[in-house]
Image (spheres, coloured by chain):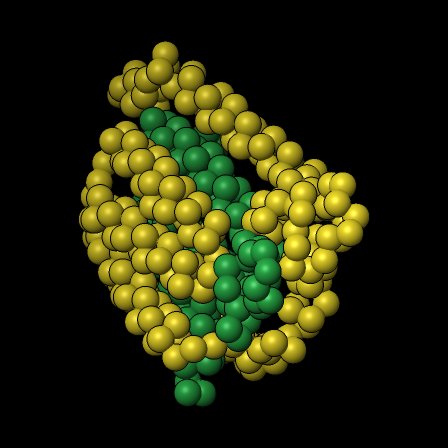
Amino acid sequence: MSDPVLLINVLLLLLAIGAALAAMWTRDLLGAVMLMGIYSLLLAIEWANLFAMDVSYTEAAVGAGASTILLLTALTRTGTREKAGPNFHPTALLTVLVTGAVLIYGTSDLPRFGDPLAPATVHVAPEYITQTVGKVGATEATENDFGDHVPNAVTAVLASYRGYDTMFETAVIFTAGVCVIIILRPLAGSARRRTAGSKEDA
Amino acid sequence: MSLFETFNSIAFVVIMMLGLYTLIARQNLVKKTLGLGLFQTGIFLMYITLGVRDDGVAPILQEGAPLTYTNPLPHVLILTAIVVSLSTMAVALALIIGVREEYGTIEADEIATIDRADAEEGA
């Protein structure tokens, strides 16, 4: 792995962690949503830096775009101020420190960054790159002559090797859309049942 | 050099723990949703980092040149995860709007207080 990639990688991640920290720290929800948008955009650049182009596009469109719009829409209905309270939470800090320590201990077993002999790189990746299962026609294709293959390996894996996964992913999106409609529709009619009820009690 | 190579492993743990801390320490439901999203992106970072390979280029095959490519499988898995995270967030936000209409607040501790008061009233 060349040095500029590693240097940009560290810089981008430091910026992203800074944006995330600010987003979590602030009590202004509108500011937090905007900072999360910046964080997602920084991550999109980071994915491009790590050569995950398709993830980069999706992160920019979904993470920085659609998520921010959804959150802003929700904020118009819920208000933008978070209640003031203590920032220090001993139980949470203890949980986070213990979990974080265990995770960092676990990452010591991970292969080195960019290791060409890592199990993931050695076992499944070459098969996906050469597309021995997914290829259509072109029986004489070699590793570097992709013939009728889809040149983008990510598209090939999504559509061919993991076709059912992708199909049911659309089912998940559809279900989520139906859920949102079902949850939000009756609210328009019976607005503030609780406040109306408490007034009757009084 | 060594720090540069292990930086991603530490970074994803830091991002995940930031999200987890917010999830526990903050009472606001929208803020909890943001923390959950942060936790998810930490996992994305772990997967993409595992796919990186020395001198690897984007996994878009090029004819002729013998190139090494990064592993496309983590990219595919994370594409699915990003879309699913959007779906879960949409449902979570819809539920939060419902909670706001019902209780008039989106702070978890205030909702618990209202629920306790209701339970005592009913008993």
Q: Residue A180 in the image: state x and y as whole percent.
A: 46, 27
Query: Residue A137: percent from the left, percent from the top?
Result: 76, 41
Residue at coordinates 75% horizontally, 45% vertically from top-left? A138
Query: Left or right: where does residue A110 sit relative to residue B34?
Result: right
Residue B123 percent location from the top left of the image? 48, 32
Kindly identify the residue that appears in the image at 24 percent across and 47 percent down: A34
Side (left or right) of A141 relative to B78: right
The quadrant in which the N terminus of chain B is found is: bottom left
The answer to which image quadrant residue A169 occupies is top right
A134 vs A4: above or below: above
Furthest residue in direction right, as rendered: A139
* Camera sees residue A118: yes
Q: Say above or below: A17 vs A35.
A: below
Q: Position of residue A40 (x, y in %)?
A: 35, 52
- Viewer-proximal residue, B29 or A74? A74
Kindly identify the residue that appears in the image at 27 percent across and 60 percent down: A19
Q: Nearer the viewer, residue A124 or A167?
A: A124
Residue in view at x 34 percent, y 26 percent: B101
Residue reaching furthest top?
A189
Q: Is residue A66 above or below residue A152?
A: above
Chain B drawn colour: green
Residue A71 visible within the image: no
User: Color of chain A here?
Assistant: yellow
